[in-house]
Amino acid sequence: MTAEPTPPDDALRLSDVVRVLDALYPPSSAESWDAVGLVAGDPAQPVRRVLFAVDPTWTVLDEAVEVGADLLVTHHPLLLRGVHSVAATTFKGAFVHRAIREGVAVYTAHTNADAARGGVAEALAELIGVEDAEPLVPADTRDHTLPATGIGRVGRLAEPAPLRVLAERVAAALPATAQGVRVSGDLDAVVERVAVVGGAGDSLFDAVRSSGADVYVTADLRHHPASELRERAEHEARAAGAGAARPFLVDVAHFASEWPWLEHAAHDLVRLVGETADAPHAGKLDVRVSTRPTDPWTARFPSP
């Protein structure tokens, strides 16, 4: 029988770190279809270094191994849908096998991180200058001690600005991607109230309209929902004799929209470990943010 690994006195166990992550992003606040929490790893193994990343890709696992991470925390799940095998003959199976072989535990915080205070939406809102942000869709919970407050955020800019200026600010703040930033609307129209959702956001158009947002910043906008939203806005503006049809749209790459959360998560993990861990463990955790871009698109060719 193989004995369980015993961490040195100055090392945290994986179970300690998972407990803190679960407090920051309660698994119970994830959507019912989601798969979050510990994916691979021995709860008794020591954890000295943690790497945060958006996607559980091979290049990110390369990075985790290269920097000596004991735990890889990703936003997107590796095993979102049920599987019947993790044989290394598949890319997901190979990922699991290598992670275990290299001693890298894997943890996922997905829709529970989307909804959390200090989560994906708040990080995006803060980065592009949205203040006094509130949940776009408040969480359906009576437990106000949970750090989950709802999907998306809506707030205001410190100073109203033309749509063009906001779009340029978004482009400058987020990681460069092949897609860049796409905009739908009058670039000279002044906007103040901004809604944001990290990741695919066109299922929340009704909530955006109800919020009174001038502009919606999100990712993965599909042709038909986006077209219908803008046509409806144009129609209602004509009927009311109003000016520019709102909300306008600012569409960014999925990876880029969720990337700002990584720094927030890293900071919050270090802070909470310091507050909750035993004194010998405090300050012993090295937390890093991945530098590997994981946007699947690698090039864009503008139309001549």
Image (tube, helix red, strand yellow):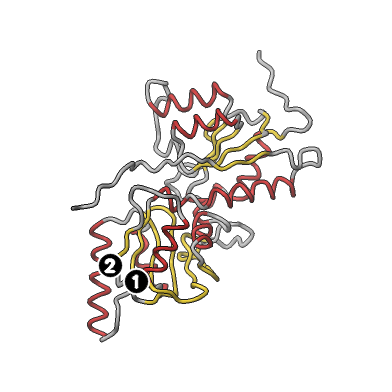
Mark 1: which secondary structure?
A: loop
Q: How many marks?
A: 2
Q: Which mark is residue 126?
A: none
Residue 159, position as x, y percentages in the image:
49, 76
Disc 1: which residue: 247
Quadrant in which the N terminus appears: top right
Asked whether, in this view, residue 42 is left or right of residue 30, the answer is: right
Residue 223, position as x, y percentages in the image:
24, 57
Write down the quadrant of residue 91 in the picture.
top left
Q: Residue at x 38, y 66 (%)?
A: 216
Q: Depth check: give the residue in front, 34 or 46.
A: 46
Q: Depth check: give the residue in front, 294 or 237.
A: 294
Q: Which mark is residue 229?
A: 2
Q: Residue at x 29, y 82 (%)?
A: 243
Q: Residue at x 43, y 50 (%)?
A: 256
Residue 69, position as x, y percentages in the image:
60, 32
Q: CA distance from mark 1 to mark 2?
A: 8 Å
